[in-house]
Image (spheres, rainbow, N blue to C red):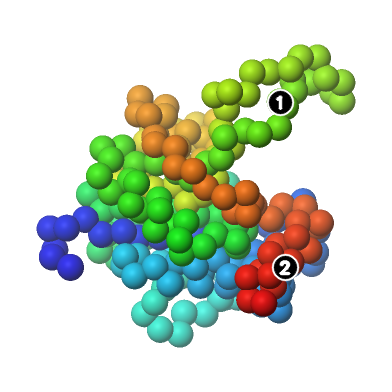
Amino acid sequence: MPTDTPRCFALLPCAGSGARAGGVVPKQYQPVAGVPMVRHTLAAFLAVARIARVLVVVAPGDDTLQAPDAAYSIAACGGATRAQSVFNGLAALRDQGAGADDWVLVHDAARCLVTPALIDALIDACLPDAVGGLLALPLADTLKSATGTRAVATLERADKWLAQTPQMFRVGALHAALVAHAAQGFAGITDEASAVEAAGQRPLLVRGSAQNFKVTYPEDFALAEAVLRSRSA
């Protein structure tokens, strides 16, 4: 690839504790279909030829993963929050040679059902775009506003989308968007798109898949395993 052609990098924040999932180890390392969940996530990105490098951001002192070859690398610079881990991971990518105009696809390690086809679809949509974007799904269910456990209103859903990952932006632009919130501990920054939106940009919404859900609760593991086994049947 010519050096003046922006490359695509992947950044997987993998430093969370996954408390809601239960278990004695962080959820990203709990087994799904016989292997740690994050291994499925890694496999999807390693299968995409346009990804120049995959960087996994883990917590300091976490040696669970090993990088036996040049296909991916590990940076033990994870922070207390996902945004901090992404922010630190961007610095690590720059240290490894990523430029400001290169693209970075940030993906939750716990979205282990992402496919190479979904990743390629996001890249295809974002490469010609000035801002970048994210996988997302139009909201299909009725949306309620609540006080405690009581519904108080039904909200309009026609313009609502459920954000997924990967989320793809220029390395320099995403770093700058996050820098603006670093002093406040990234308060209000729930994903990369929210930081880019706060910078005045409008990320592109690229239709994802209902199977690309984030494993969060104990019952999600069985569903993720069922999907993975159905794919290999």
Please tell me in which quadrant of the rendered image residue 75 appears. bottom left
Q: In this picture, is 120 found above or below 148?
A: below
Q: In this picture, is 35 found above or below 131?
A: below
Q: Residue 34's x, y, as percent? A: 71, 79
Q: Residue 23's x, y, as percent? A: 80, 64
* Direction bottom: furthest residue: 68
Q: Can you identify the residue that label 2 sits on? A: 225
Q: Amino acid at mark 1?
A: Leu
Density class for disc 2 (Cα within 10 Å; few <14, some 14-19, many ≥20) is some
Q: Residue at x 35, y 65 (%)?
A: 51
Q: Residue at x 74, y 17 (%)?
A: 154
The first of marks 2 and 1 along the sequence is 1
- SS at mark 2 in the image: helix
Q: Residue at x 84, y 23 (%)?
A: 148
Point out which mark residue 143 bears. Answer: 1
Relative placement, left or right, of 97 versus 177 is: left
Q: In this picture, is 7 found above or below 63?
A: above
Depth check: give the residue in front, 20 or 88: 20
